[in-house]
Amino acid sequence: MDRVFSGIQPTGELHIGNWLGAVKNWVALQDQYECLYCAVDLHVLTAKYDPAALAGRTREMLVSLMAAGLDPERSIIFAQSHVPEHTRLMWFFTHVTGVGELERMTQFKDKSQRMERVPAGLLMYPVLQAADILLYRANRVPVGEDQVQHLELSREIARAWNAEFSAEAPFLPEPQALLTPARRIMGLDGEAKMSKSLGNTIGIFDSAEQIWEKLRPAKTDPARQTKKDPGTPELCNLFTLHRHFSSAETVQTVDRNCRTAGWGCIDCKRVLSESINSEFAPIRARGEALRADPAQVDRAIARGAERARAIALDTMAGVERRMGFLPMTGQG
Ligand code: TRP
């Protein structure tokens, strides 16, 4: 069976941007593939971060993923730092990766430009990402558009490593991107991409009241200055959300009432608020159950790491042998 790997940085709780852009699709992929999903806490070191918050955020992300419907029985859900082989394989990959290629990565160029001192880890970011995937010999990687370049580099690393160390029968598969169907969703302010730190999004654990409080002031089609002005749904960010969260029938009703000014934006927001609330109600309930039983969460996280590590050690044995390292065969 094909194997899926994907990772998400542990920013804390998931929000509708991550949900629509990634995790909803990850849930669906569990029916088709053997899946590994990872909170990539080591990637956090490529930028400034708060060590006092890291552990809590990593745990919160894993809880969010499980609440969202990633099933720790079927899939392997774990923290990257719990499997030390990620960084070990990254080092091995530096042998087949050119600094020039890394400097040409769009994300590196964007992020490094704004820094006066560029941490070496930022340059290595995509090498660690390649190690994440290839450590499990995963061949499918669900990602958004912005990660396509990094995935292409992972393929090049696999190709270069195979050419040098296992030319006769390639040991590492070249992973393929599974492009996430949802396009990027704008924040509720209609200005920036959704992010928790900008406060322009809705968290998967937000209550019905919190969802409503966030939607009420959200930006809509600017042509609708008053309730009487007809609008164009395609120009409204909230219509995009309706298409993701509301039934086909509701989407039609919204479309008609926007164009004819039958509804004011506030009416449309009420309906959207209900749609989002009903999609997240079961997620919220699972989140509460998980929070009520922290020992169960601890066990699931440990078990995820254990299952991931078993695959990782097997890959590393194959990698180390092909790269010519001295095996440790004596008894300690
Ligand atoms: N770079 C990815 C992002 O920002 C996160 C990530 C790290 C990842 N390692 C990965 C994604 C491996 C897919 C596979 O979204």
Image (tube, grey):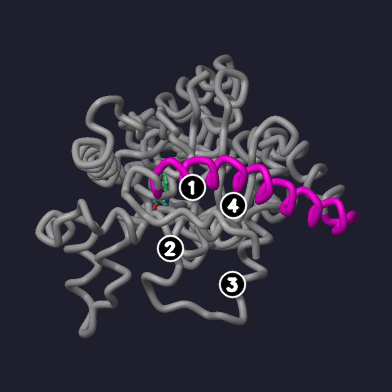
Q: Is 247 placed left or right of 125 in the picture?
A: right
Kindly identify which numbered label has been placed on residue 188.
none
Dot 4: element: loop
| Residue segment shown in magenta | 291-320
Q: How many marks?
A: 4
**What whole-number distance in Å separates the C-alpha atoms at marks 3 and 1?**
16 Å
Quick check: marks 2 and 1 in contact, CB under 8 Å?
A: yes
Q: Earlier in the sequence, mark 2 or mark 1?
A: 1
Q: From this viewpoint, which residue is outermost toward the front?
A: 330
Kindly identify which numbered label has been placed on residue 7.
1
Residue 311 at x, y percent in the picture: 56, 40
Can you tell which of label 1 and label 4 is closer to the viewer? 1
Residue at 43% from the left image edge and 34% from the top image edge: 142
Q: Earlier in the sequence, mark 1 or mark 4?
A: 1
Q: Is label 3's Cβ within 8 Å of ligand 1?
A: no
Q: Which residue is mark 4?
A: 14
The magenta stretch spans residue 314: yes
Q: Is label 2's Cβ within 8 Å of ligand 1?
A: yes
**What whole-number distance in Å separates the C-alpha atoms at marks 4 and 3?**
15 Å
**What whole-number distance in Å separates the C-alpha atoms at marks 1 and 4?**
13 Å
**What whole-number distance in Å separates the C-alpha atoms at marks 2 and 1?**
10 Å
**What whole-number distance in Å separates the C-alpha atoms at marks 4 and 2?**
17 Å
Q: Which residue is mark 3?
A: 54
Quarter of the rendering occupied by the C terminus: bottom right
Dot 1: element: strand
- How packed mark 4 is, by other alpha carbons closer than 10 Å (few <14, some 14-19, many 20 or more), is many
Question: Identity of the amino acid at label 4?
Answer: Leu
**What whole-number distance in Å separates the C-alpha atoms at marks 3 and 2?**
11 Å
